[in-house]
Image: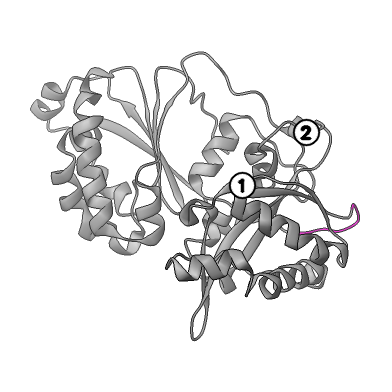
Amino acid sequence: MIHKDYNSNMDIVISGILPHSSIAAELASQAAKAAPSLFQKLENSKGTVHLLDPGETGCTPFEYWQLAHRQFTPAGQQNYAAGLGPLYAPRQYNRDQPVWLLELAHIALGAANATLLTADDLVISESESLALFESAQVVFSESPFKLLQFDTQRWHIEIPPDMVLPSLSPNLIASRFVYDWWPQDTASRPLRKLINALQVEWHEHPVNLARRQANLPLINGAWVFGGATPAQLQPAPTANPPRILQQLEVAHRKQDWGQWLAILANLEQDVFSALPANKNGNLILTGYDRLVVVSADAMPAWLCKLLNRNHKWKDWWCQ
């Protein structure tokens, strides 16, 4: 667990900035050219690496940071992704009520596997979500789950109290193949049946017929996650809130490194060029399975160069 007060000293959180290890070394020089101000700061700062196994946390490192920032503590058999239920809940719920969410998604079937697009990728309208919500009522009535409340991207559902389900973030699932994460245990059988029934119900739904005609990805699936209670999250601190930059996330998730470099260059112009003035703040950088906290070096940059002191950011960048 990361013991760090991320809310102090004007910290900046940049999600999706650490490339996958398979491409990181190749991208290092290109990234440094796209954002020279940022990488100059990395050169003269100390980076502390936190390896976060997605198989254990059930969520992305950025989501892990969000939950750590709210002092989330898993209970019992919960993983960190259980906290995403109350974290992403669109409205206030009973503090002691487990919050499970169903996120609308697109599941693309391939020859040997499937990929998932999250609700953020689909640009879902409120009317589309409401129409699908109404059609899902029958499917839920024939399952042990209860459909409670509607929101555009995510619906609040209820899980039987004696049912133990894994919680995995849709953002994590979208970064890999669905079948790598698809629960196969006996306890998850009702959930698999529910999701399969929704896919059948929505296959020829008017919403998807219209989306197909408009050449938009279909809303043909869903992902269920959560399970923690709002009481397990603390209110977000209001003093010196961190600045959060999420512009790189989608390109990182899709591993579209050309687009990623273009966005990085835009961030250089809009944000990173002012970073040297942010002497007291830390940078929190996240990727697929890592979180790096970059703290300002006590020595000025010119003295580091004079003493040939180098923290070798490429060592942890390419880790």
Task: Judge whether residue 162 is colored magenta.
Answer: yes
Could you tell me if residue 64 is visible in this image? yes
Q: Position of residue 15 (x, y in %)?
A: 40, 42
Secondary structure under tag 2 reads: loop
Q: Position of residue 7 (x, y in %)?
A: 49, 22
Q: Residue at x 63, y 74 (%)?
A: 203
Image quarter of the N terminus: top right
Q: Residue at x 29, y 62 (%)?
A: 23
Q: Name above or below for residue 14 compared with residue 278.
A: below
Residue identified by numbered label 1: 152
Tags 1 and 2 touching, CB below 8 Å: no
Q: Position of residue 220 (x, y in %)?
A: 60, 68
| Principal secondary structure, stretch drawn in magenta | loop
Q: Marks 1 and 2, Cα distance to the nearest angstrom? A: 17 Å
Q: Residue furthest top?
A: 239
Disc 2 marks which amino acid? Tyr
Q: Earlier in the sequence, mark 1 or mark 2?
A: 2
Q: Name above or below for residue 169 compared with residue 281.
A: below
Asked which quadrant contains residue 288, the reply is bottom left
Secondary structure under tag 1 reads: loop
Which circle, 1 or 2, is nearer the viewer?
A: 1
Identify which residue, 130 or 71, lies in the foreground: 130
Crowding at dot 1, Cα within 10 Å, few <14 / some 14-19 / many 20+, comes out as: some
Q: Residue at x 61, y 57 (%)?
A: 104
Disc 1 marks which amino acid? Thr
Instruction: State which region is magenta.
Output: 161-165
Q: Residue at x 22, y 40 (%)?
A: 266
Q: Position of residue 233 (x, y in %)?
A: 69, 31
Residue identified by numbered label 2: 93
